[in-house]
Image: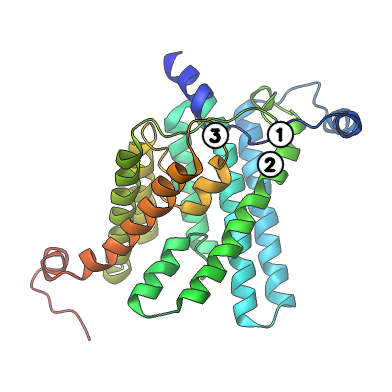
Amino acid sequence: MGQKSTWSKGRFQAMAVPPSGPQKTFLNTCLKLCRRAAGASTMLPSLVVSALFILLTLVLANGARRLLDRLVKDSFMRLLLQEAIAAFELCACCFELIIVADNFGVSAYGIFLFLLTIWWAFNWGDATACPYTHIEDVVLGNTDIRTAVLISAFELAGGMISFKYVQLLWSLEISETHRDRAFGECFTDLQVPVLYGAAIEGTATCLCRIASNALSEFKPRFSTAIDSFISTSLVVAAFDYSGGYFNPVLATSLKYGCRGNTLIEHVVVYWVGASLGAVASVFVYQHPTVQKLLFGHKEKEE
């Protein structure tokens, strides 16, 4: 169908070059053994495989967090590693959402993403896996630039490492939808001019952050689900234009080096655009007009 073929061309494919020589022979031998062990000759339903892949990632990340809480006593180092784990989990799951979007459509993608964001809200603790939240903290005077850069570096490392994990599991080709994806060529998701893409990422990020801040103050029932619904809706709305990342680490982990954009263009859209949107949200949210619109004539508690 038309939409599916469009996504297959441009939607997040793996960013790697196939190995050659002895490495390729060794890898192929390992993959054959793994496929036999996994019973890959009988393909499981593809959507079930994607769900199990995501579930496995969630279990591994949750186990890593528990282990981290037991072993690492220094609170700042624990936070750095929690951010790396959260970024790894986020990016690995979103790599698999590639498969879901390509083969089962944006509706299935949105449902998975909605449920995942609720899970992450309850399990990540203080981690965000997103650099611009730390930029917001710098603007608000809650942290310094050096700390924000260090945390962001750990997030980026976690996100980039996730690709090797995904590549290994995709290489098993347990389902038809994973066939030839581990070493496939990737293409940019940006389908509009660079400045338009940056505006889309920035505006949607700003709206997401304003909604999150308002919900954290209102504290309505099911606030986590409401927040998840808003962010997922914005992602789906931007899906066919910029890809709807709203997170520089996620965008770079999935799309850095893909054909169709230069490094500068990638940075402008996914780092500068989203970060400016996040910073703008701080000032927009604090503006008296917005406060009056959100809270009416109710006096906010000191």
Q: Is residue 154 visible?
A: yes
- Residue named by callout 1: 170
Residue depicted at 80% across the width and 32% down the height: 19
Q: How far apart are marks 2 and 3 (CA)?
A: 12 Å
Along the viewing direction, whichever of 118 and 188 lies nearer the viewer: 188
Q: Distance between the residues labelled 3 and 1?
A: 13 Å
Q: How crowded is mark 2: few (under 14 residues within 10 Å), some or many (20 or more)?
A: some
Question: Quick check: 86 left or right of 21?
Answer: left
Q: Is mark 1 on a helix, strand or loop?
A: helix
Which is nearer the N-term, disc 3 or disc 1?
Answer: 3
In the rendered image of this protein, does residue 4 appear above or below residue 87?
Answer: above
In the rendered image of this protein, does residue 253 appear above or below residue 176?
Answer: below
Question: Quick check: 274 left or right of 285?
Answer: right
- Residue named by callout 3: 12
- Residue named by callout 2: 166
Q: In which quarter of the image is residue 33?
A: top right
Q: Position of residue 28 (x, y in %)?
A: 86, 28
Question: Dividing the image into 4 quarters, which one contains the C terminus?
Answer: bottom left
Residue depicted at 50% across the width and 43% down the height: 263
